Amino acid sequence: MTHGFLSADRLFDAEPTARGIARELYEGIAGLPILSPHGHTDPRWYAENAHFPDPARLLIVPDHYIFRMLLSQGVRLEDLGVPTADGSAVEADGRAIWRRFAENYHLFRGTPTRLWIDHTFETLFGITERLSAANADAQYDRIAELLTRDDYRPRALFERFGIEVISTTDSALDDLSWHRMIRDSGWSGRVLPAYRPDNVVDPDFEGFGANLDRLGDISGCDTGRWQGYLDAHRNRRAHFIAMGATASDHGHPTAETANLGAAEAEALFDAVRSGKADAGQRALFRAQMLTEMARMSRDDGLVLQIHPGSLRNHSPSMMARFGRDKGFDIPTRTDYVRALKPLLDVVGMETDLTIVLFTLDETSYARELAPLAGVYPALRLGPPWWFHDSPEGMMRFRQMATETAGFYNTVGFNDDTRAFPSIPARHDVARRVDCAFLARLVSEHRLDLDEAHEVAHDLAYGLAKRAYRL
């Protein structure tokens, strides 16, 4: 069963009974609207609704899943058109970038990136032949021609993809002007901001002191004082909520939290604000701020997302040359049981608060995350993220988390992408894997078919809609 070069049964069990059940479940949810409650697409796209640039700048240059693989095999980021921090020259010829990509397409065999790209090529651009050096120019020309059409502008694709709502991820210092432009345009598409305060919460973030000054300027609060600093966060969060935000997002090195007394917290802030805090104090400040953000979420209703466990910018030379988010963020072992206890002591039993936990450490699923989410009312488990946003990663998550946390202490699927055209492909992979998992439960007589249909709908749509208050 094929359509073009995509099998209709991809990711389903090879065993006929389970495969047939998976097909039936998938047919019931394949056309559901897409909820994208956490991602990194640029709100400017939807605000200006301009034509996308050439195929390379749409599909390759912004996608670290693609260029990190090519870099690992010796292809320079400069030759892929990835912008440098100092603005020095990089490859500007989109066709040359595309040819390099096509020549190395075999590197993506067996990866989720290959699944996403093939899905995008066939369903969005009508390409039914696998990319290669031989057909690179022809495929480039086809995509480039389509991108000149009005039905390939961002808003048209948003509607074509069936996106009901998408959330961007925005700095606490962002004025949200693109979101305001979207709102004022009268377009019906829902593009919401999410509050990401890392650059004013993490003392190790470059320009931290100046960022706090800026936070004070735009909030009208005195960020030279602890209480004024907290008030500034409340001010900015309220502004984001007024612009439609339903969630905040926190990308910390660890899941460490703290619950200091008022005097201790104030003294710690003073040390951090002065720039004299040592490494231990800076880590403690990040830990305290996760608990402060949880308190604020309890008060204002923003869903709190915690994305810990990445040693970011592992290569200092690449950080200096290209800046953040260039493929050099590497997973680390992460503790949750002890790390989250101070925060959970404060808000863990709250039933009106939602804290979504993510991990890059799969060893924590069954040992820590599922037991925590399986008992604390405030906790929910986010989907497999980043390096584990893959068929095997999704299946491992279901296998290790469901027995203890069930399905209803999870929040569905987040595509977490900068690559706009890949959003339908990523959701399709998640829906197929979930249907395959449910089909096995049905075929083993551990779940009734009618229940599996209900769960499949919730995993694809209902859980995210409820958890993120969409």
Image (spheres, rainbow, N blue to C red):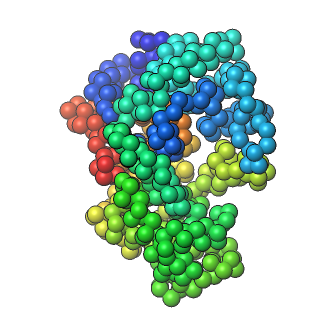
Residue at 57% x, 74% y: name it.
285
Relative placement, left or right, of 96 versus 234 is right
For residue 415, above or below residue 275: above
Q: How many marks?
A: 0
For residue 300, above or below residue 387: below
Residue at 67% x, 65% y: name it.
207
For residue 59, above or below residue 317: above
Q: Quadrant of residue 133?
A: top right
**Residue 312 on image: x %, y %:** 65, 54
Residue at 51% x, 88% y: name it.
263
**Residue 433 on image: x %, y %:** 41, 32
Residue sitting nearer the eye, 332 or 114: 114
**Residue 297 on image: x %, y %:** 38, 66
Residue at 61% x, 26% y: name it.
54
Residue sitting nearer the eye, 167 or 29: 167
For this orientation, the residue located farthest to the front is 185
**Residue 40 on image: x %, y %:** 51, 45
Residue sitting nearer the eye, 366 or 386: 386
One can see residue 220 in this view: yes
The N terminus - image quarter: top left
Relative placement, left or right, of 464 versus 383 is left
Relative placement, left or right, of 408 versus 49 is left
One can see residue 446 in this view: no
For this orientation, the residue located farthest to the left is 450
